[in-house]
């Protein structure tokens, strides 16, 4: 942990292995509060796009939500998604972690982007201080 201006920041390193399609389906079903038999078709596409990387899978689901390809329906009170084949064929969705994170960084303020650029030149890791 480190202290900065009277606050404490806890940093942890967690190593996650890629998930099998079955594990990813349980993760997606749990995240969307749906049954695993309802999410398997979506899971197949997410697994193909992310290779089961847990971090990328979550980022990918968030990207789908931002593009309104994954939406919460208040009428049916559940998460719904477009045809998984449409997701598979959509070339605007990043196909790798680097593109996904780069697109997310572009949404940050110019000041924060500049800080990240400077920090990236200094080291491969940066303290939260």
Image (cartoon, grey):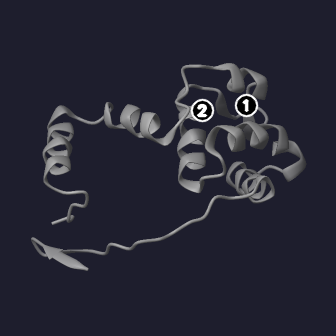
Which disc, if any, is residue 98? none
Instruction: Left or right? Give the position of 96 relative to 28.
Output: left
Q: Is any part of residue 77 visible from this angle?
A: no
Q: Which of 13 and 42 is in front in this view?
A: 13
Residue under the point 73% across and 31% down: 81
Residue under the point 77% across and 24% down: 85
Q: Is mark 1 on a helix, strand or loop?
A: strand
Q: How crowded is mark 2: few (under 14 residues within 10 Å), some or many (20 or more)?
A: some
Work out whether 89 lies above or below 34.
above
Q: Is mark 2 on a helix, strand or loop?
A: helix
Q: Residues within 10 Å of mark 1 (few under 14, many from 20)?
A: some
| Residue behind mark 1 | 81
Q: In which quarter of the image is residue 4?
A: bottom left
Q: Nearer the viewer, residue 48 or 111?
A: 48
Residue under the point 15% across and 45% down: 115
Q: Position of residue 46 (x, y in %)?
A: 69, 40
Labels 2 & 1 near each other (Cβ < 8 A): yes
Instruction: Left or right? Give the position of 24 relative to 14.
Output: right
Q: Is any part of residue 13 visible from this angle?
A: yes
Q: Position of residue 109 (x, y in %)?
A: 22, 34
The quadrant of the picture occupied by the C terminus is bottom left
**Residues at marks 2 and 1, CA–CA distance in whole angstroms:** 9 Å
Q: Quadrant of residue 74?
A: top right
Q: Position of residue 47 (x, y in %)?
A: 70, 44
Residue under the point 13% across and 53% down: 122
| Residue behind mark 2 | 64
Residue reaching furthest to the right: 37
Q: Quadrant of residue 27?
A: bottom right
């Amino acid at each position: 942990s480190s202290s900065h201006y009277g606050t404490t920041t806890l940093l942890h390193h967690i190593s996650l292995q890629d998930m099998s399609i079955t594990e990813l389906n349980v993760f997606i079903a749990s995240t969307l509060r749906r049954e695993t038999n309802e999410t398997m078709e979506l899971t197949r596409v997410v697994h193909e796009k992310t290779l089961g990387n847990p971090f990328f899978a979550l980022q990918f689901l968030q990207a789908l939500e931002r593009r309104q390809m994954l939406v919460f329906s208040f009428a049916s009170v559940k998460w719904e998604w477009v045809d998984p084949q449409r997701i598979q064929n959509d070339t605007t969705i990043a196909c790798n972690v680097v593109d996904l994170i780069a697109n997310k960084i572009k949404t940050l303020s110019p000041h924060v982007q500049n800080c990240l650029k400077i920090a990236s030149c200094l080291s491969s890791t940066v303290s939260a201080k």
